[in-house]
Image (cartoon, rainbow, N blue to C red):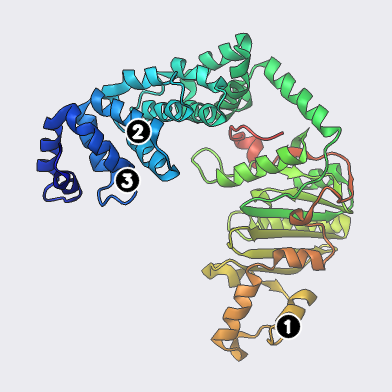
Amino acid sequence: MVNADLIRDLGRSDRYEAAADALVTFGADGVEQLVREVMDAESPVGWRPITAVLGRIGEAGFDGLLQGLVSASTEESRKRVGFAFSQLGVAVLDRYTAALTHPAPLVRRQAVRGIEHCGEAGQSAAVLLPLLGDPDQRVARQAQDTLIRTGEHVFPLLRHVRERGPGRQRARALTVLAELGGEPALSRADMAAIERLIRIKLRDDRPEPLWACWNHWMAVPGGDQAGIMRVLGLTAARPVTFALGNDIVDADGHGCDTDEHTGYERVFVTPELDGWTLVLGAWCDPHGQERREDVLRLCTELSVRYGRAQAYYYGGQGDGSAWLVAEDGTVIRRYGETGEAEDELLTLGEPLPYERARRMELGLHPDWDPAQESEDDEDEWRWTAHDLAPDIARSLGAASPLDVTADTPSRGTGVIALTPYGVAHGVPAGAYRI
């Protein structure tokens, strides 16, 4: 019987080494108590130091944690023992590989994680492939995500699955290929199948809310999609469903500012929605330093041709708002509140009627004059304006991507198009909802 105080000493930095050495000498005889401690959410000892001891014990430690995975009765205990099981290291790599066929889905899933934590997922790709077709979707997703992180050297294996099967692995093999390499990684047959599926989906496609963590869009009255794209310099347009267009824009926004891509490479141009055409994507940002002046110029040019053009930014996680309104070749208003010091440098023109009305509702002067207002008044307005972009769009009668529903009147088909950035640098790889 292992002394409980010895296990507790694993949580003390001054006693850890001696306690760990002593516990390892117990070998298999101490495993059961150590595993119980890992599973105990009330234990004062974290799972990491206990796992290190179990890893030193070796296969008996692996077997104890596997049994813990199978017998754990609460979500918390499963979580704790799962973390420990997957961190035992390369010494038990063969046991992880054998566990990929275990009857319990949780064991299979954690075995995949264990192989990845060993740094051997690339070398073990062939044994991970069958799990792409696992009947448990969480196991299949774990295998998929792990293979994505292994890199492009798995392409030949994945292409073989796409060409020869088994059929249950083919869908996720396509996802891995797309995530790692994008269209260049896909065969002609796969690209033709994807395009055919998009055409089929478009027959019954209905508008849906277009929402991302960071929402940037332009709004132009009318439905001259082709003309709007010419003014903006957009090219290589390809038809997409609403789900696909939104997914691409959202993914690009999350992946921007990498060494290879900025997030400005492509946009989603909607069909005519309730009398307006929307262009969505970070390239439409009226606030950020990289794009603000070009977006101002483009909205001005659009307003010459279409009478009006607007651009908006709205941070869906409380990251602020900005709006730009142009009419007949003149910028009427540009304003932003994002908490950045340079926000006030963005301001152009006089407050819009809705801005004035909203300030009056707050008991503030309709025209903001910092010299005549208290610091509290300034803060109140800034916090209000932080979330104002969607309301500004509604007040101007413009369709807002955040308000789109299946009942929104729609005419035409949406497209994904390349911006000049996309033409120059290409687009990021990714797998998206159709």
Give the image quarter of residue 183. Answer: top right
Residue placed under numbered mark 3 in the picture: 40
Identify whether 409 is placed above or below 350: above
Disc 1 marks which amino acid? Glu
Element assignment for label 2: helix
Disc 3 marks which amino acid? Asp
Q: Nearer the viewer, residue 140 or 234?
A: 140
Disc 2 marks which amino acid? Gly
Residue 122, how many percent across, how many down?
41, 21
Picture residue at 76% right of the left edge, 47% below the top? 232
- 225 horizontally vs 44: left or right: right
Picture residue at 89% right of the left edge, 52% below the top? 222
- Disc number at residue 68? 2
Q: Is residue 105 visible?
A: yes
Identify whether 91 is placed above or below 165: below
- Label 2 and label 1: CA atoms lie apart by 60 Å
The answer to the question of whether label 2 and label 3 lie on touching residues, with beta carbons closer than 8 A, is no
N-terminal of the pair, mark 2 or mark 1, is 2
